[in-house]
Image (spheres, rainbow, N blue to C red):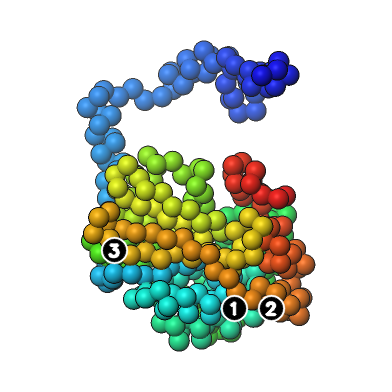
Amino acid sequence: MSEKLIAPLTVHRGLATWGEKLVPLAAFRQAAAETGLRLTQREREAALRAYRKATADSTPVEGPYSRIAVFGGVYSNHLALAEVLEEAARRGAEAIYCLGDLGAFGPSPEKVRPLLSHGGVLAIQGNYEESLASGREDCNCGYTDPRDNHFAEISYRYTAQSCSPGFKAWMGTLPRRRRVRVGNRELLLVHGSPRRVNEFLFHSTSPAPFLEVLLDQNRCDGILCTHTGLHWQRRLPSGRDVVNVGVIGRPANDGNTHVWFAMLEAREKDGLGVELLPLRYDHSGLAAEMRREGLPEEFVETVLTGWWTTCLEILPARERAASRF
């Protein structure tokens, strides 16, 4: 490796970031030692037990099922919703779950509700449902970037104006979480994370020890979530699972126009089988409807190309590096 390439890797050696400045690492360690807690081994173990202790949760357990379909982020994409309901039935799903965010991004959100009803979909509230049902002025999406918030405002305003009072009231009746038994596994279904409806659980920034703690705290064998728009699965050292089921409202920022959902089934050998599946739908028809509704051309471009043009600033470095923009 050339010295030119090595230099950026070694420029901070021996230094630590303290606020907005770099300080000698030894000084940083000394300051941390002077202000931090000093625990005995017994106190440390007790603190860890308390931290991992399961919290009370009265959410009833549904099922048991042998096979279920789960998807997130409809984003008003009624065309993909119709397709996923057909595909789930074809694959023998005994129940179909939606992890929230029925509106946003796409056109004509009122077309979503009858499909959910006729398909017997069991849904939970996402941040969109919470905001629309309570009359909030924003989607509570969790963005911090001004450009992201600009497009989020356009999307939320359009959805709020296009949803009937009855639809919004119905959103408010949805539970914020569900518990589902698949075979011998009890799964917790949430929108963002068990901690917060708009928390982003990305694959690259959700290490196994952190996920194990979430499972311990929530007394479950698996967590199913969405919100990030990117699907992933991790089998943890404990044998438990965390699955981000992706969204059916827009593609996964990979240059493909299909969207993603999950099928989960009971398996005798490993307890839980997880399939993350691509779903094709009439994306050209959706794009045409979006244009008729006057939605931003940036949204339309994402549907037609498979690359995100908005909401990019939330992506961690690894996920952003895989993006086109």
First in sequence, mark 1 or 2: give its number. 1
Q: Give the residue pinned by disc 2.
A: 285
Q: Give the residue pinned by disc 3.
A: 266
Looking at the picture, which amino acid does disc 2 mark? Gly
Looking at the picture, which amino acid does disc 3 mark? Ala
**64 shown above or below 28:** below
Distance from disc 1 to disc 2, alpha carbons, whole Å, reads: 8 Å
First in sequence, mark 1 or 3: give its number. 1
Pick the residue in front: 244 or 274.
274
Q: Give the residue pinned by disc 1.
A: 79
**69 shown above or below 119:** above
First in sequence, mark 2 or 3: give its number. 3
- Residue 285 image offset from top left, x and y in percent: 69, 78
Which corner quadrant of the image does residue 210 belong to? top left
Looking at the picture, which amino acid does disc 1 mark? Leu
Q: Residue at x 71, y 67 (%)?
A: 304
Split into 4 quadrants, where in the image is the N terminus? top right
Pick the residue in front: 276 or 121.
276
Q: Residue at x 47, y 15 (%)?
A: 30
Which corner quadrant of the image does residue 249 belong to? bottom right
Distance from disc 1 to disc 3, alpha carbons, whole Å, reads: 29 Å
How many marks the image carries: the answer is: 3
Pick the residue in front: 104 or 257.
257
Tags 2 and 3 touching, CB below 8 Å? no
Give the secondary structure at mark 3: strand
Tags 1 and 2 touching, CB below 8 Å? yes
